[in-house]
Amino acid sequence: MFSSLSNRLAALGASLRRLPGSLAAFLATLPQRLWRWLRDTLRNASNRGRPEPNAVARARIVLCMLVFGLVYATIAGRLALFASASDGQITRRVVNSDAVASARPDIIDRHGLVLATDVKTASLYAEPKRLIDVDEAVEALTAVMPDLDAREMRERLDTKRGFVWLKREITPQQQHEIHRLGLPGIGFMTENRRVYPGNSLAGHVLGSTNIDNQGIAGIEKWVDGSGLAELHLAGLATDRQQAPVQLAMDLRVQQVLRDELVTAKEKFKAIAATGTVVDVRSGEILAMVSLPDFDANKPADALDPKNLNRMTTGVFEMGSTFKALTFAMALDSGKVTLNSMMDARGALQFGRFKIHDYHAQNRMLSVPEVFTWSSNIGTARMALMCGVEAHKAFLRKMGQLDRLRTELPESAAPIVPRNWGELNTATIAFGHGLAVAPLQAVMAVNALVNGGWLIPPTFMKRTPDEVEKLATRVIKPETSAKLRYLLRLNAEKGSATKMNELAGGYYPGGKTGTAEKVINGRYSKTRLLTTFTGVFPMDDPHYLVLVILDEPQAVPGTYGFATAGWNAGPTTGKVIARIAPMLGEMPRTSVPPVESLLTSYNKVAQVP
């Protein structure tokens, strides 16, 4: 290496000798002088030939100075390069990088249908330094895009900045017309824009993105939080070759559920409606709708308070649908059997508070009769037989006292009594005094019918192995069989008969719930929240359908009633009748007797 360098310096010296006079002589020997000096310095620094200690120290100091000088010279050169480049060129490189990095994976349903995807769109920018006539540019651009504020645009353009945005996401027609203007300093940036082909079909689930294509709500935000944002920062997600995110949702079932909820909301003049369809064996959410909803392509509409996702963000007293949990607790404890009798001959009194039955029978009721007549008194007595602490422990085990977490970032914590006494246990037993997110209650009811396994709900597809790892036994298989018996019995003889008339061929069961809403701290007799939980088929449960109507009204045909059996129940029956064939369930011309469910629990005792 040294000989090669010496030869090059000798050649340089030969060329310099051609210069005139003493300058030529000096310059001719300069390369050799420098080479000898550098060689001696390196030798001294490496302590070769054992030079004087002072010479070694000086040589090493000189080498350090040379290295630092080289580093600073490199930095200065890069700064000079950036200074000589236009601001617009630098900014374009950065923005282009960011625009590419904001590419997102498609979101698809369980059958591969696209729910969300990216499209390329143009955005308009300017380089004010390159503009010739600001007034001309403002006049021409506002003629093409009248929605732009001319004064604001003039303020942006009349600066010395190298780059400013004028409008993000313009139409192809606008891009074509602006391009024809031929204005110097005006350009276009190709960016990724998120679009949702279903518009408002699944807005609450999918969420939305901001102007920079970053997830800000729903599954979109979950995707960013699951690693997409970090990939963007690392520059590893800059193309459209990302694997799509596949949800457990079924777009066909989602359409049916939304269609029936829209119809019910209009028919019964409700202020809101919500519902879900869940696979009880895996916890997969096949559909979820909350009305009023919003177009996912217009994320600003999601900020309207009336458009909140009532299934996960709202908390409600679930009414008599909560009675199923009380029955499960009492039957699983062994303190109550199906043959037990409950005293419902009069109101149950706690001080100045009295608990009444809506359909008062004023007699001793068997446990199945307590369920089919939806007796508040009988249900409260069962809860009190188990005790306050046992009641709290059971509800906690069923996931009703803690915030439910899913892939959706938006969730609400339940409202639990601060001082929980016997009166609280009595009222919570029939669905008053404890407010939970509806999806939270769905998770618990799933466990009551799937053999006793509590499985957290999910919007993603799950494998059987994943289900087995997540499932936790919370009640005995025989208790689950008794709950399925009661739910089916209620469809044949109780408050769910109208639902059964519409979906009877699929062997459904269910429970109504009518809760009085709390208005200004008091329960209102006229403003109701009606709920229906339906499950099918009851001899081998696979799917659960929940429908909630907020403040439905009595209409012609309901005989002055606005309770769940007249509105939420029939709506659930219509949903089941339409989605069951899509989900592979075949209608039956004859169904097994309800008593057979008490001996069939071994079919679903294993992990779903």
Image (tube, grey):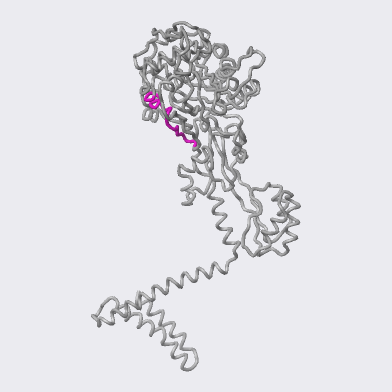
Q: Is residue 18 above or below residue 532?
A: below
Q: Looking at the image, which is closer to me, 24 or 64?
A: 64
> Residue 348 vs residue 607: left or right?
right
> Residue 414 vs residue 162: left or right?
left
Please, which residue is most extreme toward the left here?
Answer: 50
Residue pictured at 57% horizontal, 69% vertical: 84
Residue 423 in which image quadrant: top left
Q: What percent of the width, then of the height, locates residue 598?
A: 40, 10
> Residue 419 vs residue 585: left or right?
left
Q: Looking at the image, which is closer to me, 456 or 227?
A: 456
Membership of 536 in magenta stretch: no
Quarter of the figure that contains the N terminus: bottom left
Q: Which residues are magenta?
A: 392-408
Q: Looking at the image, which is closer to me, 43 or 590?
A: 590
Residue 465 in which image quadrant: top left
Q: What percent of the width, then of the height, locates residue 496?
A: 53, 13
Specify whether residue 602 is in view.
Answer: no
Q: What percent of the width, then of the height, locates residue 111?
A: 52, 30
Count how many numbered circles sit on residues in the image: 0
Membership of 393 in magenta stretch: yes
Quarter of the figure that contains the C terminus: top left
Please, which residue is most extreme toward the front here?
Answer: 352
Q: What percent of the width, then of the height, locates residue 42?
A: 32, 77
Q: Is residue 315 above or below residue 368?
A: below
Residue 183 in which image quadrant: bottom right
Specify whether residue 223 is in view.
Answer: yes
Q: Is residue 416 above or below residue 348?
A: below
Magenta region, main secondary structure? loop
Residue pictured at 61% horizontal, 51% vertical: 190
Q: Looking at the image, which is closer to me, 580 or 487?
A: 487
